Amino acid sequence: MPANYLPVLIFLVIAAALAALLLLLGTSLGRYFSRHHSDRDKLSPYECGFEPFEDTRTRFDVRYYLVAILFIVFDLEIAFLFPWAVALTKIGLFGLIAMGIFLAILTVGFVYEWKKGALEWD
């Protein structure tokens, strides 16, 4: 039984050796053949091409996270429309009704969040 795993072990050893060799070559010879020359300006942090205005560890407003989470939730729910559209001919009227209910619930949730002011920045 262990003899069956010998090709897998040989493959893993060769892959690890090749990865180590390429990393070693990239770090040792990269400085001689690279067009990238590091200097103080290239290694400094920047914000949209400008020097940072304040510390990067400042707190974000909670509304930023709320809008980000709402975007992810609604974006993932919209992603369910693609497989539904592809399989619409196979699922027929039942699939159409089920997706109509799904979109109605999605619309109610979106209107609720809009009325609560979750999408407002001010």
Image (tube, rainbow, N blue to C red):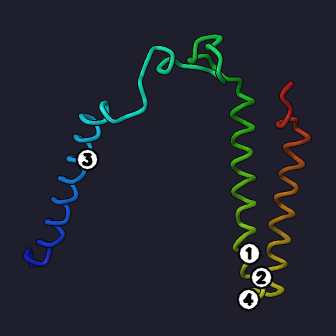
Q: Mark 2, residues whose alpha carbon is within 10 Å: few (<14), some, or many (≥20)?
A: some
Quadrant of the image for the C terminus? Answer: top right
Residue wearing tag 1: 84
Q: Are marks 2 and 1 in contact (CB under 8 Å)?
A: yes
Q: Mark 1, residues whose alpha carbon is within 10 Å: few (<14), some, or many (≥20)?
A: some
- Please tell me whether mark 3 sits on a helix, a strand or a loop: helix
Q: Are marks 1 and 4 in contact (CB under 8 Å)?
A: no
Label 1 or label 4, whichever comes before in sequence order? 1
The image shows residue 44 at horizontal and vertical percentages of 50, 17
The image shows residue 8 at horizontal and vertical percentages of 18, 69
> How many numbered discs, if any?
4
The amino acid on which the numbered mark 1 sits, given as a three-letter code, is Trp
Single out the mark in the foreground, 3 or 2: 3
Residue wearing tag 4: 90
Residue wearing tag 2: 88
- Please tell me whether mark 4 sits on a helix, a strand or a loop: helix
Residue ID at (87%, 57%): 107
Mark 3–mark 1 Cα distance, whole angstroms, equals 45 Å
Residue ID at (77%, 76%): 85
Residue wearing tag 3: 22
The amino acid on which the numbered mark 4 sits, given as a three-letter code, is Lys
